[in-house]
Every structure is written in structure tokens, then in C-alpha cells.
Amino acid sequence: MAQLTCIVVTPEETAFEQEAEFVALPLFDGEAGIAPAHSPLIGRLGFGEMRVRQGSQVERFYVDGGFVQVRDNVVSVLTNRAVPVAEVDAEQAREQLEQALQRKANTPELMAARDRLIAQARGQLWVTRS
């Protein structure tokens, strides 16, 4: 069976590089599923769960926005942060969400910053749901 190569790069390191049968990614407007022979794609990532399946094994990560490129069975993910779901602290995410919701925002720039913080916290809470 054909395979994908999934590479996840953050500003600090190559966080993940592995062969995969399927990769699911959070896009800013939904979710994308990538299988071998997928057509070329460039997309903007949202905040949420990336799943990488190889056989019966599924690795789950929280990704913090960024971009994805799919080309020639290579899934390249550029993100600010990629954290295994097991390392995401739900209580800390709840606190961040509460603080973001209480944050004053009276200019378009402050509203955009607040909305980003809310989306990040909600994405982290979503991945800790199970």
C-alpha cells in the first residue's frame, strides 16, 4: 500500500517525521483528510487536532495554526507549536479561555488578538475531550 511521509516543523525543531497511511488536519475552515495520491494542496491550519494513522496506531497532536502543503505523497506541516495530545493541560486551557473571554477588545487589532487566544484555548480543550 502507498504511504505518505508526514513532516511537522515548528520554529524550534522538526517535531515529527514519520510514514503514515492517513493524516487528518484541522484547517481554519474545517478538517482535511489526506491519503496517498491526494491532489496537491496548500492550506491554512486552524487550532486543533492532527491525527496520523499508521496501521492500527494513531498519533494525536495539538497544532497551533500554520500551513500545510501536500505534494507527491508528502504532507508538510508548518506550525507554531505541535504538542502530543497527552501533554496538553486541559485545566490550563480552561484558564486561558476564561482570561481571553474577559479580555477587553475595543479595536480591530485587539479583537483579532482576543479571537486568536479564544480559538487556541478552545482547540486545546477540544483535543483533551477524550
Image (cartoon, rainbow, N blue to C red):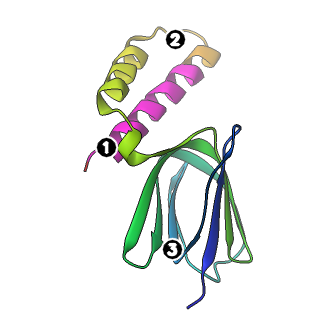
What kind of element bears circle 2?
A: loop
Which picture quadrant has residue 126?
top left
Q: Nearer the viewer, mark 2 or mark 3?
A: 3
Q: Is residue 22 above or below residue 30?
A: below
Q: Earlier in the sequence, mark 2 or mark 1?
A: 2
The residue type indicated by label 1 comes to Thr
The verdict on residue 39 being magenta is: no
What kind of element bears circle 1?
A: loop
The verdict on residue 124 being magenta is: yes
Q: Is residue 91 above or below residue 83?
A: above
Q: Is residue 114 left or right of residue 44?
A: left
Q: Percent x, y for residue 51? A: 46, 61
Q: Label 2 belongs to which residue?
A: 105
Q: What is the crowding at mark 1: few (fewer than 14 residues within 10 Å), some, or many (at least 20)?
A: some
Q: Earlier in the sequence, mark 3 or mark 1?
A: 3
Q: Start and end of the magenta stretch?
A: 112-129
Residues at marks 2 and 3, CA–CA distance in whole angstroms = 40 Å
Per the rendering, the mark at residue 128 is 1
Q: What is the crowding at mark 2: few (fewer than 14 residues within 10 Å), some, or many (at least 20)?
A: some
Q: Label 3 belongs to which residue?
A: 22
Residue at image position (39%, 71%) is 57
Q: What is the crowding at mark 3: few (fewer than 14 residues within 10 Å), some, or many (at least 20)?
A: many
For this rendering, which residue is in front, 89 or 47? 89
Residues at marks 3 and 1, CA–CA distance in whole angstroms = 21 Å
For this rendering, which residue is in front, 15 or 23? 15
Q: Earlier in the sequence, mark 2 or mark 3?
A: 3
